[in-house]
Amino acid sequence: MAIDISEITKVETQPGELPGKMAAWVIREEREGEPKDAFALEEIETPEPGAFEVVVRVMAAGVNFNNVWAALGEPVSVFGYGDHPEYGHHIGGSDASGIVWKVGDGVTRWKPGDEVVIHCNQASYEDVEVHGLDPMAAPSQRIWGYETTWGSFAEFTKVQAQQLLPRPQNLSWAEAASYGLTYFTAYRMLMERAKMQTGDNVLIWGAAGGLGVFAIQLCKASGANAVGVVSSDEKGELVKELGAVDYINRNEFAEMMRTGDETPAEEKERFKASREFAKRVKEILGDAPDVVFEHVGKATFPTSVYTVKPFGKVIICGATSGYELDFDVRYLWMRQKEILGSHFANAYECMKANDLMAEGKIRPVLWQTMGFEGVAEAHQLMRENKHLGKISILVGAADDQEGRTVDGPGAIRAEVGA
């Protein structure tokens, strides 16, 4: 049955009462494949909040690559874990802004009508790690909208109350939905795990990408000196606008990128290029970097370990070029460097990062806003690498300017990419 979304900006109930049905972009196991085929618009029952849960009216949703993986069923299908076996379907979307519509038992901080953004970390309140170590260490830790089914590509979404943050009023709904997953990840990496200090020198790979644009801004806001690695001079000018001291076009040092299949002679040339790259970084910053911001992995990790200064830190949250890493470990132990892993952020870190957004010290970088009908198309663009930056999806919001109530710089509109 065709779903009419022409009235998607209207809700037939008032805050506190949920409609029986809602429109949602749904992936089912039998449809796994290309995003354009896997996502289908369906009318399903609106979820009710359980204890310590909240149902939010989604005003806008952000698009991330994790739901390209969900559509494809790669590297593993989402349907075998999280709460998917319970519900049998997947509603993606790990970034959102919206309005609290109904709260469950035990929720006291939030009430219907509150305007919020949603961070994507969930964990069971019964896990002891949540109450003394770090929710990211909890056995139940999972990413909402990927490892759970009730994501943001629907009129309503169900979340844990601890996932809610006040919406920055200097941003529109679309802008407020665009930054959570990548920005909060970058915040934890630099501010908490690497413990970046004022005056530190920082090397940022993929500086014009989804993570890098926030890493650059965090360095500027913290008084650290950043050099960004980018794939073009145009992207280099963007990272300088965001606060980098300067940039390096990685194409000048293409030989440094590791494949893992190098012959001894090719490895010798690769290492030579890495040395020249490290020399350029040092020339720009005046010293070797105290911190290297890594998320590329296989192609760049040997250069990162070599380039960071003695007692410096390489912080990594992903591996877009491959996760099987090899490098000359002598540069690690002889010069007493550190390798740190990082994954998303806990609620306290998200709150602190969101405060910087509300103060205008950090800005979203948004490429395009699409209507609710564009969910499958947006993921297909991402799948084919035809997107040029962050995409927000309008759900309850009528246009990409709706929601801003106080003056502020808003998002930077730019074509970006690592």
Image (spheres, grey):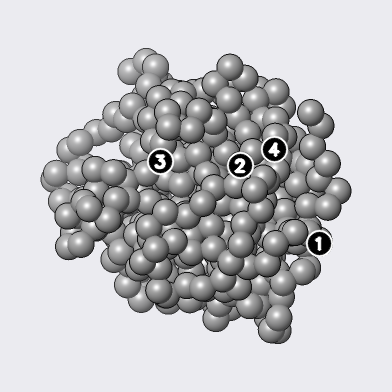
Q: Amino acid at mark 1?
A: Asp
Can residue 301 be seen by looking at this rendering? Answer: yes
Give how far across and how far down residue 105 sits, in percent. Answer: 39, 63
Q: Amino acid at mark 2?
A: Glu
- Is 384 above or below relative to 118? above
Residue that mark 2 sits on: 45
- The local secondary structure at tag 3 comes to loop
Residue at 30% x, 64% y is 192
- Name the mark nearer the viewer: 1 or 3: 1
Q: Are marks 3 and 4 in contact (CB under 8 Å)?
A: no
Residue at 86% x, 48% y is 6
Residue that mark 3 sits on: 318
Q: Amino acid at mark 3?
A: Gly
Asked whether, in this view, residue 355 is left or right of residue 373, the answer is left
Judge by depth and name the residue closer to the eye, 238 or 285: 238
Residue that mark 4 sits on: 43
